[in-house]
Image: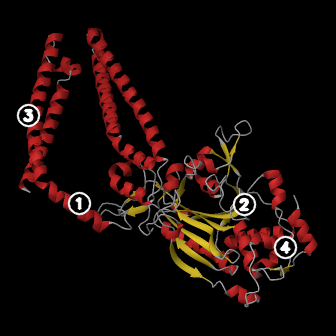
Amino acid sequence: MQQLQTHKTLTLMFAAYAVSLGRFTMAFMPHNLCLRLPQKASTTTRSAAAVVVSKNILAVTTRLMAITSSSQDSTNSSSSSSKSSDSDTTTTSNLVHGRIPLGSLTCLDSRAIVDNLDLVLSHLKSRRASEETLSAANLIHSRNNERVSLIQMRDAALQTRNEQSKIIGQLMKQGPSSDEEKVQEAKKLSQAAADEASLAETKLAQLEEETNALLAGIPNLLEDVVPDGDSDKDNQEVEKWGHVESLPTKLGWPTDGSFIPKWHDDVAMSLNGWKAENAVAFSGARFVALSGHVARLERAISSFFLDMHVTQHGYTEVSVPYVVGRSALEGTSQLPKFEEDLFRISSKSHQCNGEDAFLIPTAEVPLTNMHRECILEESDLPISYVALTPCFRAEAGSYGRDTRGLIRTHQFHKVELVKITTSDTSMQQHEELTRHAQACLEALELPYRKVRLCSGDIGFSARHCYDLEVWLPGSQEYREISSCSNTGDFQARRMNLRYRPNAATAADSDSDSSGKKKAAKNKKPKPAFCHTINGSGLAVGRTLLAVLENYQMPDGSVVVPEVLRPYMGGLDVLKAASPSAATANSSEK
């Protein structure tokens, strides 16, 4: 311990002496010698003085570095074993779900990675991130020294330029008697310093661009409540609503095993409303067409959801474009990492303000970008938006999965919920939005469960995410119907979406020299990044298939849920088509 203290003391002495030497050096830099040496001193004299100063600094610095290095070596050798054991103890005792807890760290930017590399890496490993992603974080951290050096180089050059400009001004004030040689020399030094500053600035901009590109591929940090896991099999069930036998009992399904629930596509076919083969003929695989009562039921579901969120939950309905530019998708973090999952529009056909254009994968993109590059007022938050849109997804990584029915298609309708709020209310608003999505399922009396996604299954931009999984009797399983994510300020930073906190009046209780209290000062808070929350409320296609499967009857008809009947013109049952019509429907090419 005493050796460690000695090392710290020597280090402080070295730092203090280095500062003094730095000041001494600045006084005798060649471009200042004309002011420090006698007027008649020659150039050779000035150069010699600078060399002497440099040699003295180098000698003293070398001696000090040798002393501190020796002290550090002895300290390291005596304490390395204890440091190692202390580190191991701290690491194992403080981990949450196998990773370092967030603590006071609230955002993920380059500074967070530089200052908290171990924490960031532990979260990336918890997410089962690729080696490429881990390397990107390490590279951002290692290149910080280069960034600091460039900043110091630029600032030093700018200081030199300013000093030489001041010298030029002083010399010019002397009028005709000024030394033209000195003026030209100062101008030359000023220009050289300006060029050096410009070069450093250019390198800084390039480094910043490269760092941002690396940062764009790094996913969000995780809330401490997120469990560790590899896949959806490790997700944590939070609650379960309804019983899978409740609706069958209410509808009077046979209990003797004579009735086996059908898949939704078979149910829709019995209603003569399933036109999947027709759609495939002109659009290709993973596209579906619906008709008749089935198409009307889909529209009824979407209208019911919109009305529920607007009238009961206080959302503002928004009609948004279905085409967005690259920067909008970068803001919500679908780009650059997930471009292969998007439908891109040919640049010859259309561009968005000169950018690549894409069909929206979800209304989350246009809704969240409604306020990009804006500073909102805290008093106007939270903002709650809802929109019904088609969603277009290439599903590049899902080849061979869920090829049947409406589970996974390239185009589907979804009612999207988005909240823009403050950091203080972020968690509360996330819970509230999730509850609004749950209310939709409960109104339809569909059994579901709520799960918290594990670290290996959670989305790229989410800090914390709930999935709602609805019961499907046809396949006898729960399937995702909504995903509700809190992204913190992850998206807001990318789209520069901020809010100005409410102004606070801080009274300074200190007294001035007369004994009177100082007047209160109005402090103007700096803008802070918003937090964004999004979720499905709900996916319309998956709700349709859940209704078809849960409300089917043995005779092929489908009971209309009570809350949807006003949207179906009062219909309470969708009757099955005649056997000949159903057969014709199934054999259409």
Q: Which mark is residue 63?
A: 3
Mark 2–mark 3 Cα distance, whole angstroms, equals 73 Å
Image: 110 above or below 57: below
| Residue 209 x, y percent position in the rendering | 46, 38
Tell me whether the residue at label 2 lies in contact with that at label 3, contact meaning CB atoms closer than 8 angstroms: no
| Cα–Cα gap, marks 1 and 3 | 33 Å
Which kind of residue does numbered mark 4 sit on?
Answer: Ser
Report the mark closest to the observer, 3 or 4.
Answer: 4
Classed neighbour count for the residue bearing mark 1: other residues with Cα under 10 Å, few (<14), some (14–19), many (≥20): few
10 Å neighbourhood of mark 4: few (<14), some, or many (≥20)? many
- Residue placed under numbered mark 1 in the picture: 87
Question: Of circles 2 and 3, which is in front?
Answer: 2
Residue with the mark numbered 2: 412
Q: Is residue 375 above or below residue 458?
A: above
Q: Marks 2 and 1, how far apart in space?
A: 51 Å
Q: Which residue is mark 4?
A: 270
